[in-house]
Amino acid sequence: MDLLIKERKIPLLCRAVRSSSRSGIEGPSTQPSVRTGDRSMTFPLTGTAARGLTKEEIIQTIRPKLRRVLIVLNNKGGAGKTTTTANISAQLAAALYEAGSTKRVLALDLDPQGNLGLDLGYQGRPGDDEGQSVINVVEGTGPLHILRDVRPHLDVVPGGKVLKRTTASIIGTRSIDPRREILLSLAQALAEVASDYEWILIDCPPNIADLQHLAAVSAEYVLIPVCFDQGAIQGLEGVSEVFDVATPLNPALTPLGVLLFGFDRQHLRKVKDEEGGVIGVREIGFLAKKRREIEGVLADSGIPIFQTVITRAVNVADQCRKHGRVFAELADLSAGPDWKKHAKQHQLTLSSESAETSAIEMEEATAEIIRRALALEAEAYA
Ligand SMILES: Nc1ncnc2c1ncn2[C@@H]1O[C@H](COP(=O)(O)OP(=O)(O)O)[C@@H](O)[C@H]1O
Ligand SMILES: [Mg+2]
């Protein structure tokens, strides 16, 4: 991989990552693993064997292993979930790689659209099973299939069209006990591999409640991107329904915060000191109004809206998805000496938008999000 996230982006995250390592939640990896020719990896599913245990026993065993699982959730499509999952995963993995960590990042795609594979560039590669292994885990017929090294220190569990089967044939069961067991199946499979990973991120689908519940039962934190064109209440309603279903099985589930996504950059004004140096940004117009509106909806919930805003950059996002790069990678490419040649060869155009700005926003958002998760972790498990 020639597109490592560069120096300029690392220090902030490294600090977050290093301090996170200090908290020593997980011990060194003991998980057996098998490397195969297509750089994918399969783990034994002892979760299936655990199916004789009571619900309480399962929860007690798996919860401590899943304290760094973060799901990205919003019931609406186009809210920025996949972009956020891909970028945060890549940023964290790059920081861990730079820090020489033995731990990695796992990104799991639970969306039948499989767009994470586009954003991270592994769609259609050998080992992309389009969600088959997630179905196997849910059905108890096979292990979680992990595609290794889509970036240094970044592994994925692919999603895709096969996941459509979950709702129809599996989680569709309405009798309570089998349903609970099924809802816990992904959490069990993730607990099996969690010691290899500093962070596990799950990209959730919009509008498929059963898959959202499966993710929420596995997670500690819920990150909620809210898009500029989305009603504040509408965005958060679906999320609270997921909490209602998941918390009886997963009382640890915690909303991490709202990430404002796709807002017009013109509504961020630079604040300068007397010498003309930039000392901050001020939100104006629609963006300021939207933040106040969402703050109003969140009211006393204690759920923050992250300070960092991911601004609208349609062309940058387009190129990223088309070419399987995250923002920082595109920024590095476009800043490099061979950019013109490369752009021509790969039909990349950025017009007036700056991939660098998008990359910095994502880096700042990642740092803020991880800082908040670590603060909550310290509070809950001190
Ligand atoms: N900063 C951005 N500005 C504008 N469009 C973006 C930005 N980032 C991502 N996009 C595009 O917005 C669309 C929806 O984003 P996506 O992350 O797929 O949302 P979701 O996963 O919630 O459906 C995608 O086409 C994506 O490429
Ligand atoms: Mg998506």
Image (tube, grey):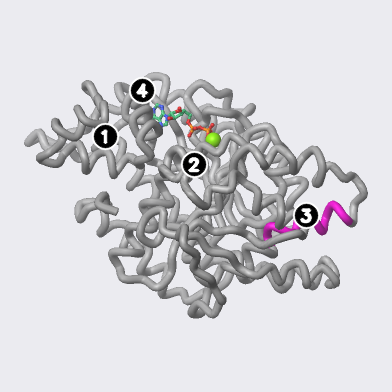
Which residue is depicted at the point 16% across and 39% down?
A: 335
Identify the image quadrant of the N terminus. Answer: bottom left
- Magenta stretch, overall SS: helix
Q: Which residue is mark 2?
A: 124
In front: label 1 or label 4: 1
**Is the residue 290 above or below the residue 159 in the image?**
above
Residue 24 locus on image (x, y percent): 47, 76
- Amino acid carrying mark 1 in the image: Ala
Q: Which residue is mark 3?
A: 139
Q: Are marks 1 and 4 in contact (CB under 8 Å)?
A: no
Q: Which residue is mark 4?
A: 264
Label 2: how many Cα within 10 Å (few below 14, some 14–19, many 20+):
few
Measure the C-alpha gap from mark 3 to mark 1.
42 Å
Q: Secondary structure at mark 1?
A: helix
- Amino acid carrying mark 2 in the image: Gly
Q: Secondary structure at mark 2?
A: loop
Identify the image quadrant of the C terminus. Answer: bottom right
